[in-house]
Amino acid sequence: MTDQIALVLGGTSPHVELINKLKQRGYYVILVDYLNNSPGIAAADQHIQESTLDKEKVLQIAKETRASLVISTCIDQANSVCCYVAEQLGLPHPYSYQTSLDVTDKGRMKRIMTEYGISTSPYTLTTSVEGIDWDKVAFPAVVKPVDCNSSKGVHRADSREEVLRFVEEALSLSRTGYAIIEGFNEGDEIQVDCFAGQDGAQVLMTRQKKKIHGGNGMVLQSTGSIVPATLSEAEDAQTKEIASGIAKAFGLKNTPFFYQAIRTANGISVLEFAPRIGGGLSYYMLRNIAGVDSVEIAINSFLGVESDVKARAVERHYSTNLLYMKPGVFDHLEGVDELKAEGVIYESFQMKKSGTEIDSDLRSGNRVAAFIVEADSPAAVREKEKQAYRRIRVVDAQGNDALNREVNF
Ligand SMILES: Nc1ncnc2c1ncn2[C@@H]1O[C@H](COP(=O)(O)OP(=O)(O)O)[C@@H](O)[C@H]1O
Ligand SMILES: [Mg+2]
């Protein structure tokens, strides 16, 4: 019998785990990625250098290779292409192409959340600066393109002038030509990882983003998160209600998903959600902290196979810490092994290869490494973090310590 063919869209590092698991299941794995140096290439059986965002091209490749599975687990746009191709070819997929469009467009997402009474701030959409419905704009506001990610074009606006300027920018970034203006939520930002089963949704893990100091009240980049989020009983109950609400509103079944929200003084307000597993350290944390293998669940979700998901209660306290480097050329890390041996650090990850050039932006792409600490209280977590930040050295090509500690303290 010939192996079944799986087409994986995107070779990001979280997809390495996906590729390996598919191989274990007996698939011959073909990676589609327009880059020629992504981490997934070495893991896959074959690499086709094409854009994962070109849905007609991917459809053609899927036909030519006779793929029986087209999959992506943590890239929004690629997920949508998977659903499109699978629908065209009658292959299994986790939700309809229409649903995938509903969730990669912040305008559609907000409309559906509002219709279903899911707690989210008021909003208005516009295709031009002249067309802004000022009756629906309250300050402070947040302006965004409807269809970008990684905080691209997202700004807080405190005046009409700022709204005008940021709407113009958002319109130039949006592929569909729409900007959204919504109410600003004051408070800590949380992320809630969930699973939608056949009858209802459950919360798997909560985390709270650590803010980068010196911002304007908006966390556009984060230095990591604490797990679990420090929620009151009422907030805890609300996270579950929202999870069920989202699963119902978007018709999610047998799918992992996560949402981002702000804990405001008046309860939790949802910013956005994604029907997939998170990128970055999400997989590691869900497996090691909540005991849930999210990649396994995601594959099952694509194949239409039910998963028996039971998250274990998170008893201890954790934090993830993303290390940003000052501009320069990254060379190597120092101090990590000792900190691990002493039990200060629970786990560490190097995210950049030696020789990578880093600019001054606090972008997610400028994180060179990360570490996780574990302790029995939030205060003890903080102590371990401080010790680790003091002792870790991010050494640049000149031999200097270039760790950007200012963003953390
Ligand atoms: N209405 C809002 N109130 C407060 N902060 C917001 C709001 N909208 C977005 N943000 C901040 O901006 C970040 C990026 O916005 P988001 O809507 O999640 O877009 P993206 O798709 O780029 O992640 C959020 O993680 C949050 O920190
Ligand atoms: Mg977001």
Image (cartoon, helix red, strand yellow):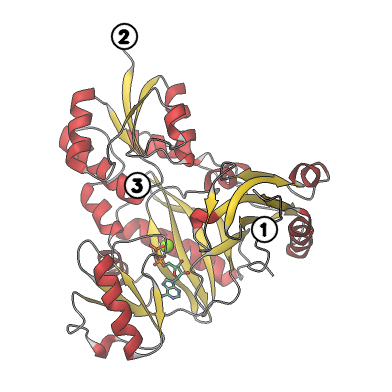
Residue 227 shows up from this direction: no
Could you tell me residue 57's position as x and y percent? Answer: 19, 37
Give how far across and how far down residue 268 sits, in percent: 48, 72
Quadrant of res 230: bottom right
The kind of secondary structure element at disc 2 is: loop
Q: Is the residue marked by circle 2 packed among few (<14), some (14-19), or many (20+) residues within 10 Å?
A: few
- Identify the mark at residue 253; answer none if there is no mark: 3
The local secondary structure at tag 3 comes to loop
Q: What's the residue type where badge 3 is placed?
A: Lys
Quadrant of the rendering where the C terminus is positioned:
bottom right
Residue at image point 59% right, 62% down: 223
Q: Quadrant of residue 291?
A: top right
What is the x, y in percent for residue 72?
36, 40
Q: Would the CB of label 2 be found within 8 Å of ligand 1?
A: no
Residue 135 is situated, as x and y percent measured from the top left of the image, at 25, 90
Q: Nearer the viewer, residue 77 or 26?
A: 77
Is residue 189 shown left or right of residue 333?
A: left
Precedes in sequence: disc 2 or disc 3: 2
Compared to 214, does 284 lie above or below?
A: above
- The yes-or-no answer for disc 1 within 8 Å of ligand 1 is no
Q: Amino acid at mark 1?
A: Leu
Indicate left or right for 81 with 349 as reference.
left
Residue 136 location, quadrant: bottom left
**Label disc, if present, on residue 403 of the rendered structure:** 1
Q: Which residue is mark 2?
A: 1
Asked if residue 333 shows in the view, the reply is yes
Q: Nearer the viewer, mark 3 or mark 1?
A: 1
Figure quadrant of the N terminus: top left
**Residue 408 shown left or right of residue 306 in the figure:** right
Q: Within 10 angstroms of label 1, few (less than 14), some, or many (20 or more) residues?
A: many
